[in-house]
């Protein structure tokens, strides 16, 4: 599904990603773990085409993405929920969701399945995004990304600053999407307990490199935690 090889990424003259190699299968939930500042967010931005990536390869279903503009990557089926959510605070929930259709090849009316995943949104469609709690904004951001029915969903720190009840709700949504088997999900996260219950595979990053990876059900959580603390 997603095959990254020898990927390098830069901010200005500083190299942030150093020869990243990773594969994620179709329908798999993969988690990228690590301390702050090790390159996790930069990796997601590289997949989305938001940072300078002079070397390497990003294959989405065998199609090379390295020279494809960000907008066209979205059209090819990459959905992205950035850290901080970045909803439009002055627009209503309904208007925010409609924007998700702009990156879809099948534009039209919103489908009801997104409200089945996030029922709280349906009861507040006329409320402005800026009036929502942090957890509600996170649900809105994920729902907006799902509107276009992406092949691959990138979630950057979905539990950051979120109350425990909504963390559980987001976990249930990811599990529902996983059961459907037609969407690959990549999550950047520091909350190890959260991903242990939903992920199939994990990568630990440090200093712009992947230093550990494997099947999460076969791994020792203490060993993963120790790698994250290096």
Image (tube, grey):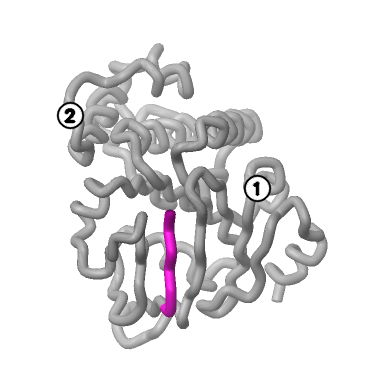
Q: Is residue 22 left or right of residue 14?
A: right
In this view, 80 is above or below 3:
above
Picture quarter with the N terminus: bottom left
Q: Residue at x 27, y 31 (%)?
A: 96
Q: Where does label 2 land, which residue?
A: 107
Percent x, y of residue 41 = 45, 62
Is disc 2 surrounded by few (<14), some (14 to 19) or many (20+) residues within 10 Å?
few
Q: Earlier in the sequence, mark 1 or mark 2?
A: 2
- Would residue 166 be visible to someone looking at this image? no
Percent x, y of residue 51 = 30, 69
* Start-end of magenta stretch: 1-6
Q: Is residue 171 left or right of residue 145?
A: right
Percent x, y of residue 166 = 58, 31
In this view, 28 is above or below 56:
above
Q: Is residue 100 left or right of residue 158?
A: left
Q: CA distance from mark 1 to mark 2?
A: 33 Å
**In this view of the protein, which residue sits in the foreground, 126 or 20?**
20
**In this view of the protein, which residue sits in the foreground, 53 or 16?**
53
- Which of labels 1 and 2 is toward the front? 2
In this view, the residue farthest toward the front is: 62
Please say whether residue 5 is one of the residues in the magenta stretch.
yes
Is disc 1 surrounded by few (<14), some (14 to 19) or many (20+) residues within 10 Å?
many
- Which quarter of the picture shows residue 183? top left
- Give the numbered dot on residue 170: none
**In this view of the protein, which residue sits in the foreground, 51 or 149?**
149
In this view, 185 is above or below 177:
below
Percent x, y of residue 158 = 51, 45
- Give the numbered dot on residue 195: 1
Q: Residue at x 30, y 46 (%)?
A: 77
- Which quarter of the picture shows residue 139? top left
Q: Residue at x 36, y 16 (%)?
A: 112
- Would residue 105 be visible to someone looking at this image? yes
């Amino acid at each position: 599904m997603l095959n990254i090889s020898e990927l390098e990424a830069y901010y200005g003259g500083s190299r942030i990603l150093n020869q990243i190699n990773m594969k994620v299968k179709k329908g798999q939930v993969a988690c990228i773990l690590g301390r702050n500042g090790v390159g996790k967010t930069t990796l997601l931005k590289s997949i989305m085409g938001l940072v300078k990536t002079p070397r390497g390869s990003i294959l989405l279903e065998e199609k090379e993405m390295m020279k494809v503009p960000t907008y066209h990557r979205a059209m090819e089926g990459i959905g992205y929920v950035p850290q901080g959510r970045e909803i439009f605070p002055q627009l209503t929930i309904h208007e925010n969701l409609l924007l998700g259709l702009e990156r879809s090849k099948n534009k039209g009316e919103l489908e009801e399945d997104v409200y089945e995943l996030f029922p709280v949104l349906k009861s507040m469609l006329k409320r402005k995004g800026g009036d929502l709690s942090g957890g509600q904004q996170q649900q809105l951001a994920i729902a907006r990304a799902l509107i276009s029915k992406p092949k691959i969903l990138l979630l950057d720190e979905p539990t950051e600053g979120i109350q425990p009840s909504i963390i559980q709700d987001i976990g249930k949504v990811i599990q529902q999407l996983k059961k459907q088997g037609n969407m690959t999900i990549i999550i950047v996260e520091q909350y190890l307990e959260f991903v242990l219950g939903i992920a199939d595979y994990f990568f630990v990053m440090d200093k712009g490199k992947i230093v550990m990876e494997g099947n999460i059900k076969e791994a020792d959580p203490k060993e993963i935690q120790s790698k994250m603390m290096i």
